[in-house]
Amino acid sequence: MAGGNLRTCAAGDPVKDVEEAVETANAPHFANGASIFYDDGGKVRCFREHIGSGLL
């Protein structure tokens, strides 16, 4: 994946793209925080706008 390595906090495993990162972030019903470390601002913005977490 160009630009960085997305990882989930829950599993710690790399995800293939920002869509999978959003799915993973939205999967737990009680999660209230999420993090993303990536050097592509557009993908970070997409993640931020599509997660259900109250804290990023």
Image (tube, rainbow, N blue to C red):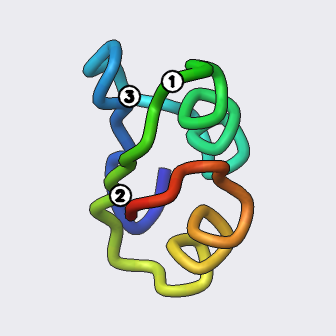
Mark 3 and mark 1: Cα distance apart in space: 22 Å
**Which residue, given by chain and number where applicable, does mark 2 sit on?**
36
Name the residue nearer the viewer: 34 or 15: 34
Residue 7 image position (x, y, % from top left): 34, 36
Amino acid on which the number 2 mark rests in the picture: Ile
> Who's the residue at 73% across and 60% down the image?
50
- The mark closer to the camera, 3 or 1, is 1
Q: Residues within 10 Å of mark 2 (few under 14, many from 20)?
A: some
Mark 3: which amino acid? Pro
Q: Earlier in the sequence, mark 3 or mark 2?
A: 3
Q: Horizontally, is 37 left or right of 46 in the view?
A: left
First in sequence: mark 1 or mark 2?
1
User: What residue sits right under mark 1 in the picture?
Assistant: 30
- Please name which of the two marks, 3 or 2, marks the residue nearer to the observer: 2
- Left or right: 1 as drawn, with respect to 48: left
Question: Which numbered disc, 3 or 1, marks the residue that appears first in the sequence?
Answer: 3
Q: Which mark is residue 14?
A: 3
Q: How many angstroms separate mark 3 from mark 2 (CA)? A: 12 Å
Q: Is residue 25 above or below residue 5?
A: above
Q: Nearer the viewer, residue 33 or 48?
A: 33
